[in-house]
Image (cartoon, rainbow, N blue to C red):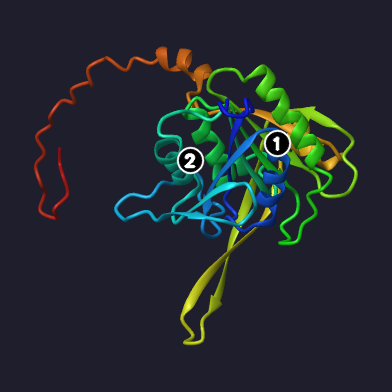
């Protein structure tokens, strides 16, 4: 907690950049709850996943964009932002909450793997900070986030009040549109992108490739994030960064991995006149 105000200290990050409309809306909600510190990329970093900057310097500067908000822009990735916040802004003392977003575009299902928004929240959880990633199904720069804000406040207050299970964070996605029916606690849907790389030509007629694709949902369950969003609900998926497939351990334990490889008998071979092996 912030010692001066006894309000919670909240770290706000994103992947769309420090000037994005989504982070502005998230800051406004968090200001109603506690003392806000913002560390965000100086430009768009979508799709960066859990990348970190190695081998080149990071720039990290104080900026003044919104009154009463301590803000820093970073030249690195969303995960770099969290690492710098913990080490340089909070100097090892952890904020009470880390929120990431609001992302312009969904991070449901398999998108969580690629998302810079969610990776920033994952990094917060790795640092043992209760963390939440927020995303809206609208890629527009002028997207309307107003219908999300009451739900964001409720979820953040619940996390501050109850905490989260160890090594767990929340992935929250909102449908586009003015009316949200409610919140559904979900599992991640079994879905993926069927990618295509469209070949184009630059002005010098050299080929380059533009990633396109179609989102394919193989999961017909009604307890998934895809189903909830398709039916007008906000989805909340508890996410863990332990990627161990625990259910596979008993299967692998049944393998004879410690056995010595079988010794193959060496057979002398004689070449015939045409070069064929006679055995």
- The answer to whether mark 1 and mark 2 are in CB contact below 8 A is no
Q: Which residue is mark 2?
A: 82
Could you tell me which residue is drawn at 63 percent across and 47 percent down? Answer: 68
Q: In x, y percent, where is residue 5? A: 62, 29
Does the image show residue 252?
yes
Regarding residue 104, the answer to whether it shows in the image is no
Question: In x, y percent, where is residue 151?
Answer: 79, 35
Pointer 1 or 2: first along the chain: 2
In the picture, measured across the screen, residue 235 lies left or right of residue 98, that is right
In the figure, residue 256 lies in which quadrant? top left
Alpha carbon distance from label 1 to label 2: 19 Å
Q: Nearer the viewer, residue 278 or 134?
A: 134
Q: Secondary structure at mark 1?
A: strand
On the picture, is 95 further left or further right than 262?
right
Q: Residue 172: which disc?
A: 1
- What percent of the width, then of the height, locates residue 134? 68, 41
Front one among 101 and 238: 101
Q: In which quadrant of the rendered image does the N terminus lie? A: top right
Numbered disc 2: secondary structure: helix
Q: Looking at the image, which is closer to me, 158 or 49?
A: 158
**Label of residue 116 in the image:** none
Give the residue at the far front of this rendering: 4
- Quarter in which the C terminus is drawn: top left
Identify the residue at image location x=69%, y=56%. 21
Residue 248 drawn at (x, y percent): 49, 19
Question: Which residue is drawn at the image coordinates 9% and 42% (left, top)?
Answer: 270
Q: How busy is the neighbourhood of tag 2: few (under 14 within 10 Å), some, or many (20 plus)?
A: many
């Amino acid at each position: 907690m912030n010692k001066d105000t006894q309000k919670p200290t909240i770290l706000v990050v994103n992947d769309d950049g420090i000037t994005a409309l989504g982070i502005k809306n998230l800051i406004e909600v968090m200001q109603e709850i506690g003392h806000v510190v913002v560390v965000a990329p100086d430009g768009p970093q979508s799709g960066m996943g859990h990348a970190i900057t190695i081998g080149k310097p990071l720039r990290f500067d104080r900026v003044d964009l919104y009154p009463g908000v301590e803000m820093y822009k970073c030249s690195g990735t969303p995960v770099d932002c969290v690492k710098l916040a913990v080490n340089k802004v909070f100097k090892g003392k952890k904020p009470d909450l880390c929120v990431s977003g609001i992302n312009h575009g969904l991070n449901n299902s398999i998108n969580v793997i690629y998302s810079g928004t969610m990776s920033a929240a994952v990094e917060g959880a790795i640092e043992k900070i209760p963390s939440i990633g927020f995303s809206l199904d609208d890629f527009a720069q002028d997207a309307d986030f107003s219908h999300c804000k009451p739900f964001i406040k409720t979820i953040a207050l619940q996390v501050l009040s109850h905490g989260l299970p160890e090594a767990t964070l929340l992935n929250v996605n909102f449908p586009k549109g003015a009316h949200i029916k409610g919140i559904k606690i979900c599992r991640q849907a079994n879905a993926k992108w069927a990618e295509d790389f469209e070949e184009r030509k630059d002005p010098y007629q050299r080929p380059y490739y533009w990633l396109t694709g179609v989102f394919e949902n193989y999961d017909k369950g009604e307890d998934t994030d895809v189903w909830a969003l398709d039916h007008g609900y906000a989805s909340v998926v508890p996410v863990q960064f332990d990627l161990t497939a625990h259910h596979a351990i008993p299967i692998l334990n049944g393998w004879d991995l410690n056995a010595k490889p079988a010794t193959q008998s060496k057979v002398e071979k004689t070449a015939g006149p045409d070069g064929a092996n006679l055995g």
